Image: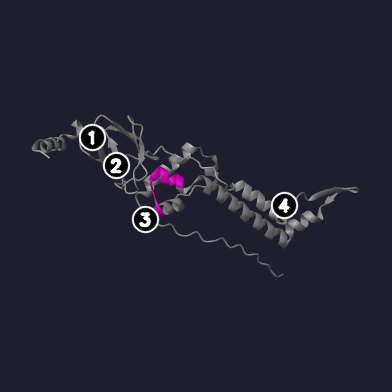
């Protein structure tokens, strides 16, 4: 090789990035607030229509030209559009979108009402005992007191059946709240994970009445307002709820 070849190669290598042709751009994407690296970010080249995803460490490599425009997309974050920088290394931050709600995934899990209706069918006798029905019965000889209704109302079996059905009603209401106030919803709104997410879910679990009556907007506003309180003492752990013990005490006359 003659001297002119090395001179040309040196000149090309020292050209500014924006004067070169296609080059490989390398970079890292991270969360602007937490400073954590972001994986599974989609990077779209508007000229070539090429789409790539960065790796779990937030790193990516993509072939670009100086006039290209890149779009960064990730669920839960605001999309960003930027021109290819003059340097071949890009460190890019993305801002979390607090308006984002994860797409509902339809799967084979049964709804709380389906589970509740199944329990009523399975424990039909208990539900029948728990509901004494009308105390007045009408027969061929006229109206009178229903012996079965009185027995269901006053017997120990009837009282136990009512306790059982009340417990099943509480389980149903808890399942309904769990299906509305979900870890995925809170994580996508606030970015909480692990022990802090679990702590928030326990401390600010809404009531059944609120969860079933609130609109989606009201629920998200409730979560965000509670987060402002949570940030003051994020490591505060609530005391465990003690089980309610209901003794059936028989008194001697």
Can you identify the residue that label 2 sits on?
A: 61
Which is more toward the observer, 29 or 179?
29
Pointer 3 or 1: first along the chain:
1
Residue that mark 3 sits on:
235
**Where is residue 38 shown, x and y percent of the image?**
33, 45
Front tag of 3 and 2 = 2
How would you rate the neighbour count of disc 3 (Cα within 10 Å): few for under 14, some for 14-19, many for 20 or more?
Answer: few
Q: Which residue is mark 4?
A: 131
Among the two numbered marks 3 and 2 on one chain, the one whose residue lies closer to the N terminus: 2
What is the chief secondary structure element of the magenta stretch? Answer: helix
Distance CA(mark 2)–CA(mark 1): 14 Å
At 43% across and 53% down in the image, what residue appears? 198
State which tag comes first along the sequence, 2 or 1. Answer: 2
* For marks 3 and 4 on the same chain, the one whose residue lies earlier in the sequence: 4
Question: Does the residue at mark 3 contact the one at mark 1 (Cβ under 8 Å)?
Answer: no
**Disc marking residue 85:** 1
The stretch of residues the image draws in magenta is 184-194
Quadrant of residue 147 within the rendered picture: bottom right
- SS under mark 1: loop
Q: Nearer the viewer, mark 4 or mark 2?
A: 2
First in sequence: mark 4 vs mark 1: 1
Would residue 15 appear left or right of 156 to someone viewing this image? left
Comparing marks 2 and 1, which lies closer to the viewer?
2
**Other-residue count near label 4 (Cα within 10 Å), few / some / many at <14 / 14–19 / ≥20:** some
Say whether marks 2 and 1 touch (CB < 8 Å). Answer: no
Image quadrant occupied by the C terminus: bottom right
Q: Secondary structure at mark 2?
A: strand
């Amino acid at each position: 090789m003659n001297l002119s070849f090395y001179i040309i190669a040196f000149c090309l290598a020292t050209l500014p990035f924006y004067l070169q042709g296609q080059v490989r751009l390398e970079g890292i994407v991270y969360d602007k607030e937490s400073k954590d690296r972001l994986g599974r970010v989609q990077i779209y080249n508007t000229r070539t229509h090429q789409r790539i995803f960065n790796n779990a460490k937030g790193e990516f490599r993509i072939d670009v030209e100086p006039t290209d425009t890149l779009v960064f997309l990730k669920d839960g974050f605001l999309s960003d559009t930027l021109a290819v920088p003059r340097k071949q290394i890009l460190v890019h931050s993305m801002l979390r979108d607090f308006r984002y709600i994860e797409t509902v995934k339809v799967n084979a899990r049964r709804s709380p009402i389906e589970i509740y209706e199944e329990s009523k069918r399975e424990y039909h006798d208990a539900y029948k005992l728990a509901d004494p029905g009308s105390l007045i019965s009408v027969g061929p000889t006229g109206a009178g007191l229903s012996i079965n209704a009185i027995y269901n109302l006053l017997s120990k079996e009837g009282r136990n059946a009512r306790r059982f059905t009340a417990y099943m009603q509480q389980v149903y209401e808890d399942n309904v709240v769990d299906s509305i106030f979900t870890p995925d919803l809170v994580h996508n709104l606030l970015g909480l994970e692990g022990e802090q997410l679990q702590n928030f879910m326990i401390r600010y679990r809404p009531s059944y009445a609120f969860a079933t009556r609130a609109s989606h907007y009201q629920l998200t506003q409730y979560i965000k307002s509670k987060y402002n309180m949570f940030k003051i003492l994020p490591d505060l752990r609530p005391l465990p709820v003690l089980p309610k013990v209901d003794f059936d005490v028989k008194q001697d006359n």
